[in-house]
Image (cartoon, rainbow, N blue to C red):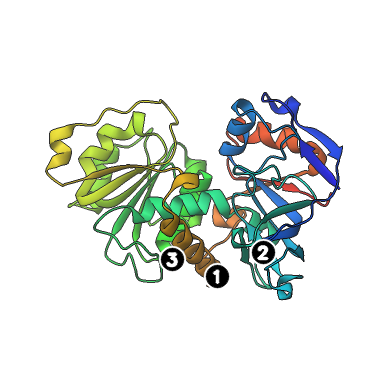
Amino acid sequence: MRAITYTQPGGPDVLQLVDRPTPDPGPGEVRVRLAFSGVNPTDWKTRSTAEPGPGGQVPNQDGAGTIDAVGEGVAPVLVGERVWVWEAAWQRPHGTAAEYTVVPARQTVLLGADPSFELGAALGIPFLTAHRCLTVAESLPDRLAPGSLNGRTVLVQGGAGAVGNAAIQLARWAEATVIATVSSPAKAQLAAKAGADHVVDYTQQDVVAEVRKIAPKGVDSIVEVSAAQNAATDAQVIAMHGAVAMYADDGGAEVTIPVRAQMVPNARWQFVLVYTEPARAKDIAVEDVNAAVLDGAVRVGADAGLPLHVHPLAETAAAHQAVQDGAVGKVLIDVTS
């Protein structure tokens, strides 16, 4: 099969297109013939710093395709099912930048007949991360569903990013009021298309003042991409028993929090890494995200505020570079081309 691999950490140039044996699924595993692979910041960061195993590493965690073989203990009826894949490369050599990947059966989720493979490949890391961010506050339910966030307000810091887009879509599906911050009019349009009720351009507007106009008592959940830059703002708009969920360190690796001011609302400042979140939370997230997909509440493309940038498999290095350079939208790899 054709696959992208790297044998040492480094820049995008370490990624090489090679022919390697098609892997066979072991007990409890399935093999997926991939259609699209999704590229996330975690993929290039891992490629840059993590030493691959002796056989080389196929990058990328997310993907979508069709199950074409199953291992011992897995129901043969799954062969032929369209699925999306999550965390294919987490502590495993077979990522999704290849014609085939092998993963534990639980890491494939039935996509159904209607959702596109492009959508499926865009789900994993961004949507599971967003789900965790939206459910860590003690005052909020640990499951998302239509109506579960009714009467609640969510602030998405960085509403034009992939996780920001996912958070907006999931929060709107759950019927929250969604406020998104952005840095330009073009990004404001993307956040609005994703479903944000209110969009604040932090380069032109006072975020605290604008948020307090919308939510005088504060916001229940903050999905935070840049805590180092936004902590002071977050501290001023968090509601009683709310949570600031920090899923990235854009803009700085350390955060300063006003302790006394956060004691009063019993606020939670939660660090989020999807790979190591509690197993029950992960299981719930997978179920809820797929429910939103099957409900027709999740979209990709420019009309959904998430423009697609598609590269052929041979240009995976360019796809990684695009994400590393901060491409706005979702970068995908067409594994079949």
- The residue carrying pointer 1 sits among few (fewer than 14), some (14 to 19) or many (20 or more) residues within 10 Å by Cα, namely few
First in sequence, mark 2 or 1: give its number. Answer: 2
Q: CA distance from mark 1 to mark 3?
A: 10 Å
Circle 1 is placed at which residue position?
A: 296
At numbered mark 2, what does the secondary structure look like: helix, strand or loop? Answer: strand
First in sequence, mark 3 or 2: give its number. Answer: 2
Circle 2 is placed at which residue position?
A: 83
Q: CA distance from mark 3 to mark 2?
A: 22 Å
Decide if residue 169 is on the left or right side of residue 310: left
Q: Is residue 5 above or below residue 62?
A: above
The residue lying at 42 percent from left, 27 percent from top is 251
Q: Is residue 91 above or below residue 50?
A: below
> Which mark lies nearer to you, 3 or 2?
2
> Which mark lies nearer to you, 2 or 1?
2
Q: What type is the residue that disc 3 sits on?
A: Trp
Q: Percent x, y for residue 119?
A: 63, 58
First in sequence, mark 1 or 3: give its number. Answer: 3
Q: Which mark is residue 173?
A: 3
Q: Is residue 18 visible?
A: yes
Tell which of 74 and 139 is nearer to you: 74
